[in-house]
Amino acid sequence: MEQTRVSARGENLTVKIPGRLSVKNITCSKGLTKSMDLWTWRQQFVSGRSARSRVDATLIAYDQAMTPIAEWSFNGLWPASIDFNDTTPGKETIVFAADQVQRLR
């Protein structure tokens, strides 16, 4: 967040100060399956029945030896959109929105 102040000499100064934090959306891709679980979950938000549909989740990144190298915790996660890739058939992209994110490792 930027704030403009006037210095002792009367000059306008723009300084950056900590402000309200925002959480960027998380984009994940996966192979298309028969499961309708994500689609059904997304439809709860489209139809306005989302009050109890937000979940807490953890995302873990692994290296090639399957050793965890990073971990994030998401609170209030929900599927903001689901899209099917025209250039890669059989793949769907899900964008998740979250209220809070914390890097655990």
Image (cartoon, rainbow, N blue to C red):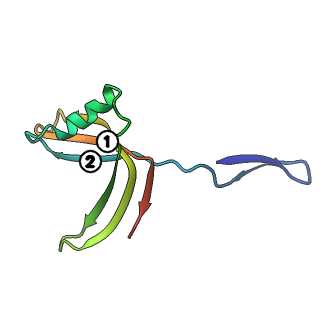
Indicate the secondary structure of the residue bearing disc 1: strand
Find residue 24 and report its horizontal and vertical position in percent.
43, 47
Q: Residue at x 21, y 35 (%)?
A: 39
Q: Are marks 1 and 2 in contact (CB under 8 Å)?
A: yes
Describe the element under mark 2 as helix, strand or loop.
strand
Answer whether residue 65 is visible to the viewer in this image. Answer: yes
- Judge whether 59 appears above or below 25 on screen: below
Left or right of residue 14: residue 93: left
Q: Residues within 10 Å of mark 2 (few under 14, many from 20)?
A: few
Residue 46 against residue 12 in the figure, above or below? above
Residue name at image x 9 percent, y 42 percent: 33
Q: Is residue 6 left or right of residue 4?
A: right
Of label 1 and label 2, which has the lower sequence position? 2
Residue placed furthest toward the right: 9
Quadrant housing the C terminus: bottom left
- Tell me if I can see residue 84 in this picture: no
Q: What's the CA distance linking mark 1 and mark 2?
A: 6 Å
Residue 46, placed above or below residue 2:
above
Q: Is residue 15 left or right of residue 104?
A: right
Q: Label 1 crowding class (10 Å Cα cut-off): few <14, some 14-19, many 20+?
A: some
- Residue at 23 percent across and 74 percent down: it is 67
Location of residue 63 in the rendering, given as x and y in whole percent from the top left corner: 23, 70
Going by the picture, which residue comes out furthest to the left?
34
The answer to whether 32 is drawn above or below residue 17 in the figure is above
Q: Mark 1 sits on what residue?
A: 95
Between 14 and 71, the residue placed more toward the observer is 71
Q: Amino acid at mark 2?
A: Cys
Percent position (x, y) of residue 94? 26, 41
Q: Position of residue 23 (x, y in %)?
A: 46, 49
Question: Which mark, by number, is residue 47?
Answer: none
Q: Which residue is mark 2?
A: 28
Point out the residue furthest to the top here. 47
